[in-house]
Image (cartoon, grey):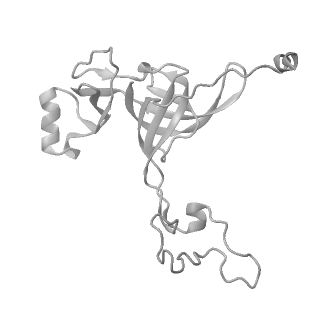
Amino acid sequence: MAGLLGKKLGQTHIFDDEGNMVHVTVIEAGPCSVLTVKDKSVQVGFGEVKEKKVKKPVAGYFKKLNVPLRKIIREVPREKDREYKVGEELKVDIFKIGDKVDVTGTSKGKGFQGGVKRWHWAGGGQTRGSTSHRRVGSIGSTTSPGRVLKGHHLPGHMGNRRVTAQNLKVVKIDAENNLLLVKGAVPGHNENFVMVRNARKQRIVKDRPKVEEKKKKK
């Protein structure tokens, strides 16, 4: 396992070696300063910040470690065979092109939404006589069980939650500018803080038999 803190910069597209257009998300991954080394994780800091914007206990913590102030402090998985030192910087080169990564961020907040948008309800009748196009309607039951079941899909707050996009492929790495380009979408708005880690549930894609081989078997 390996991980980095970063910031989502936006989406764009690039062309691969075969000339196919690939939609990617650009992430500024690192550099992250190592603050504390633990058995299974490493505490790192990311993002420059002025001293006046940091509380005194936090500023004293960084001063004791002799590490520049960082805006965000989190723990990320560490590689088993690698030795870490307090103060060293982890950069985007810990990943390679073709790696599968999990990107965790906070999804966009959409406020209070109805059931049609939040849970994709079909809605009521759309004819002129209908008075229930997008309403909730009846949600209870009769004598058994005689109550609304827990977890029923209803209108409410939507978004602004911790979301992880799994198995995103690393398409390109710009080590000079600390940029990581991954195929697909990443949760959150632009300039949103994200955590990038090696994928925990990598999909194993088996080679499918060719059409000619299928015909021979028949």
Residue at image coords 59%, 78%:
137
Q: Residue furthest front?
A: 144
Q: Residue furthest bottom?
A: 129
What is the quadrant of residue 17 in the picture? Answer: top right
Residue at image coords 23%, 30%:
68
Quadrant of the image containing the N terminus: top left
Instruction: Answer above or below: position of 44 versus 72.
Output: above
| Residue nearest the viewer, comparing 141 with 28 | 141
Residue at image coords 31%, 15%:
82
| Residue nearest the viewer, comparing 33 with 133 | 133
Instruction: Answer above or below: position of 206 versus 133.
Output: above
What is the quadrant of residue 12 in the picture? Answer: top right
Residue 125 placed where, x, y %? 72, 76
Q: Left or right of 214: which side holds 23?
A: left
| Residue nearest the viewer, comparing 50 with 63 | 63
Residue 4 placed where, x, y %? 38, 29
